Amino acid sequence: MRKFDTKVQYLKYKVLREVARLAWNDKLLENILSIPQKIVPGNTSTMRCCVYKERAILGDRVKLAMGGDKDNPNIIEVIETACDECPIGGYEVTNSCRGCLAHRCEDVCHKDAIYFDHNHVAHIDKSKCVNCGACAKVCPYTAIVNHKRPCENACKIKAISMNEDKAAVIDNKKCNSCGACVYQCPFGAIMDKSYILDVIDVIKKSEQNKNYKVFAVVAPSISSQFTYAKLGQVITGLKELGFHTVVEAALGADMVAFAESTELVEKGFLTSSCCPAFVTYVENSFPDLLPMVSHNLSPMATIAKYLKETEEDCKVVFIGPCTAKKAEFQKESVKPFVDVVITFEELQALFDSKDLDITTLPEDVLDNASYFGRIFARSGGLSDAMAQGLKEHNIDNFELNAVPCDGIEACRVALIKKRKNVLDGNFIEGMACVGGCIGGAGCLTHGKKDKAEVDEYGMEAYEKNISDAISVLRT
């Protein structure tokens, strides 16, 4: 029964599970020091130099599982003690160097970082090199290559650098909390803060006092997760955990598509506001284009706002694939509606912290959203929903020319083109993760079948259009 893509994810899950297990029983503080020893017993072989260092790193993982550094506003943090196994990286001369006479690499280097041995083979003095890449561009043999660390390579917005100890450093002014570095770090040295303890606290208080209901709002990408069980069993499992009701965030997506389609017609050009990592990227790197971002809240916040306005004294927990949602729910515009955010990884830890085998549970159903709301989970889905929104508003004198951006690099290209007024399109669908939400860092799995599973899940509601789905909200 394979639940996770990597052993790094599995290790992270084990820490979350043990923290949650102790928290359910009010024994966390008195047993917190025992968690590293329990996960890595003394007779266990580790990837580190010794079991003691492994346990020290696990101690830092426990801190992140409990909310991390409260003084750091970013939800992505670096565990410096774990960030010591990667090579320094940068530009290096490979054995493809032929010792040519031209020495173009030397001529183009303004830092005098290139030198040659007795065979005329080039070498790079790392103490002088500034990694500008000029030498690599002019080498006729492409013998000079840039070896980036996995985290740097994953971060397409260049928010990661190295400190004096060669550990990763995140520039909070650039970071959009997408979590790409979290998923790609082979040693799990970069992690997202967890609010799993807040979820447990909310549920326990609701059970003790009976004075409010706790709603689980689940992202439509849940259809491609928990592949070892049926979706209906996952829904039952959520209620077994203590959630009163499970609601589709896809219903919020229907609401957004219906409103955003008319906003597009009114303004003539629009970018989506559904992906918080994309919106933050616009705020940080393209502030001049910020007025073009839709004024609508994200599907998560939209459906949560509806619940808060119609259900007395309720709490809303969003569960999805997105680490950036953990930053979004703390924004002033969203904070009143969403109480806590966790990922699918953390939901699995919650299930297992209570020894809940969801494969043994009966199936419940989700029947809130339309096909179009559900396909928001994958790249291109929002664009399809916008077209449907225009159709249902009977707007036939406006032609949608959508530009679906699959990943932050595609977003960057589209935004640059718009800034230069050369973009062939009137609506940018910005998705920071490749594949859309199904590529989020908080997913259990990142597979090629995910898009097909989301579409299949959407087809189960194909008889509904957007108006049908949101009509229940008006009654």
Image: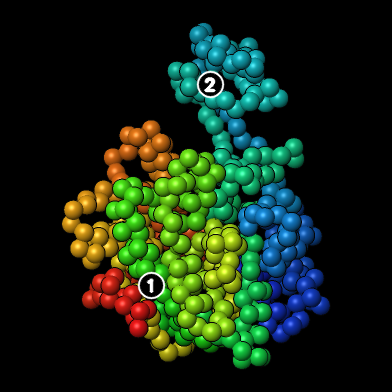
Distance from disc 1 to disc 2, alpha carbons, whole Å, reads 51 Å
Residue labelled with disc 2: 134
Foreground residue, 171 or 231? 171
Q: Does 390 appear above or below 118?
A: below
Q: Position of residue 300 (x, y in %)?
A: 47, 67
- Residue sitting at x 28%, y 40%: 424
| Residue 9 located left or right of residue 407 | right
Q: Quadrant of residue 54?
A: bottom right
Mark 1 lies on a secondary structure that is helix
| Residue 31 located left or right of residue 133 | right
Q: Position of residue 118 (x, y in %)?
A: 63, 11
Mark 2 lies on a secondary structure that is helix
Residue labelled with disc 1: 251
Res 170 visible: yes
Q: Nearer the viewer, mark 1 or mark 2?
A: 1
> Mark 1 packing: few (<14 Cα in 10 Å), some, or many (20+)?
many
> Mark 2 packing: few (<14 Cα in 10 Å), some, or many (20+)?
some
Mark 2: amino acid: Ala
